Amino acid sequence: MQLHETPVVVVGCGVAGLSAAYQLADAGYHVTILAKEMPGDNDINYTSDWAGAGLGFVGARTSSSQRVSQETFWTFWDISAKYTPEECGVSRVTQETYYDKQPDMGQIWYTKEAPAFRFMKQGEYPEPYAFGISYTSMTVEPPRYLPWLVKQVQAKGVKILRVQVDSLRGALEHVPEAKAIINCSGIGSRYLKDVLDQTVFPERGQTCVIRTSFKKMIIRSGAEYTYLIPRPASGLLVLGGINEPFNTSPEPNPASREMFKQRAYKMCPELGPPEQMEFVKDIVGVRSTRKGGYRLERQDGGKVPIVHSYGYNGGGYQASMGAAKEVVRLLRGEDC
Ligand SMILES: Cc1cc2nc3c(=O)[nH]c(=O)nc-3n(C[C@H](O)[C@H](O)[C@H](O)COP(=O)(O)OP(=O)(O)OC[C@H]3O[C@@H](n4cnc5c(N)ncnc54)[C@H](O)[C@@H]3O)c2cc1C
């Protein structure tokens, strides 16, 4: 069978599954996605609806995770050159990261790659921070980006079916012609009978959205981890965030909301004091966190090969397109 005819099935329709479908379709595969939840379902366990989402380079240490980060960044850069933020939900923004103390410079491996990268001068970042960097980065607004991505993959011939499976092999009952299974099931990998990955666990996140014309992405690294993620096409700013392992409550915690506002004000006084912020909504979602990091690997030995791509914790958008390109290489049996 020619590559361009090879049918594959993707389990999961979050940002990991849709991105995998996008890259697989571009590589000539015939793709069917099966998923129990879809974009816009607003189910707490469907993580992709709830992300901020920031897209900067990540402090990845290994060459493979740096490649995932780089490929994601530049794929989104191309998308943001071709489509407006209103169309695709991707916006180019200035990203500033403030550090409590000078970081290990190996963490900032992208100084030569990030557009307009510079070390900030003392006085450019507020007290009490000790170090700052700035570059041009991007943010994604999931309620705009995911429907755009669905349309893109459908235009490439990808079929999307709402189906719940109890095992990955069960996907072959729905797509018997599939020559490979791509596992993008997020937290589902904890429960699927032939995966049962107990290193994946739910981690609750909460953020708070305010209306403002402020358009910079700011991240505070270190103690009191805080971020501001703008959604310029909607005039919104996401203030975060929090990680609560094994908490799956969909109820927003008002104390967390107030904490995000206070920390945001401390980090960026030009937002004005919390009582003057125009509150829009709380966001609560459950991340699929994996001890030891995400799983991006091929498994052989069954009727058809499986490529796993899940466990992205708080970085599923930042990894999405790079991981999807890796899925294609793994499927082709290329040395990654
Ligand atoms: C508050 C918050 C803020 C965040 N901010 C950022 C950010 O700034 N930047 C960033 O990069 N990331 C961010 N994230 C993380 C990001 O949202 C996730 O890493 C990403 O969405 C994970 O995508 P996924 O496709 O792996 O999983 P999901 O989006 O959860 O998709 C999993 C899919 O698998 C399907 N599935 C599972 N089990 C089965 C089954 N048995 N049968 C059929 N289908 C099944 C589901 O229905 C779903 O379609 C944030 C997350 C939260 C909660």
Image (cartoon, grey):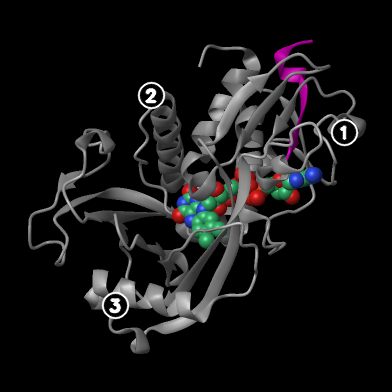
Amino acid type shown at disc 3: Leu
Q: Nearest to the eye among marks 1 and 3: give it.
A: 1
Ligand 1 is within 8 Å of the C-beta of the residue at disc 1:
no
In the picture, measured across the screen, residue 196 lies left or right of residue 142, that is right
Magenta stretch bounds: 1-13
Q: Quadrant of residue 188?
A: top right
Amino acid type shown at disc 1: Gly
Dot placed on the residue nearer the N-terminal end, 1 or 3: 1
Which residue extends farthest bottom? Answer: 275
Residue underneath mark 1: 170
Q: How far apart are the two marked residues, 3 and 2, measured between alpha carbons?
A: 38 Å
Q: Is 107 above or below relative to 24?
A: below
Answer whether labels 1 and 2 touch (C-beta < 8 Å). no
Secondary structure under tag 2 reads helix
- Regarding residue 190, the answer to whether it shows in the image is yes
Q: Residue at x 70, y 62 (%)?
A: 43
Q: Residue at x 39, y 33 (%)?
A: 70
Q: How far apart are the two marked residues, 1 and 3, measured between alpha carbons?
A: 51 Å
Secondary structure under tag 3 reads helix
In the picture, measured across the screen, residue 173 lies left or right of residue 129, that is right
Q: Is residue 5 magenta?
A: yes
Nearer-the-camera pick, 312 or 322: 312
- Regarding residue 12, the answer to whether it shows in the image is no
Q: How far apart are the two marked residues, 1 and 2, measured between alpha carbons?
A: 34 Å
Residue underneath mark 2: 63
Ligand 1 is within 8 Å of the C-beta of the residue at disc 2:
no
Residue 149 pos. (x, y %): 61, 47
In the picture, measured across the screen, residue 156 lies left or right of residue 122, that is right
Residue 326 pos. (x, y %): 54, 25
Residue 132 pos. (x, y %): 18, 53
For residue 271, which numbered disc appears in the image? 3
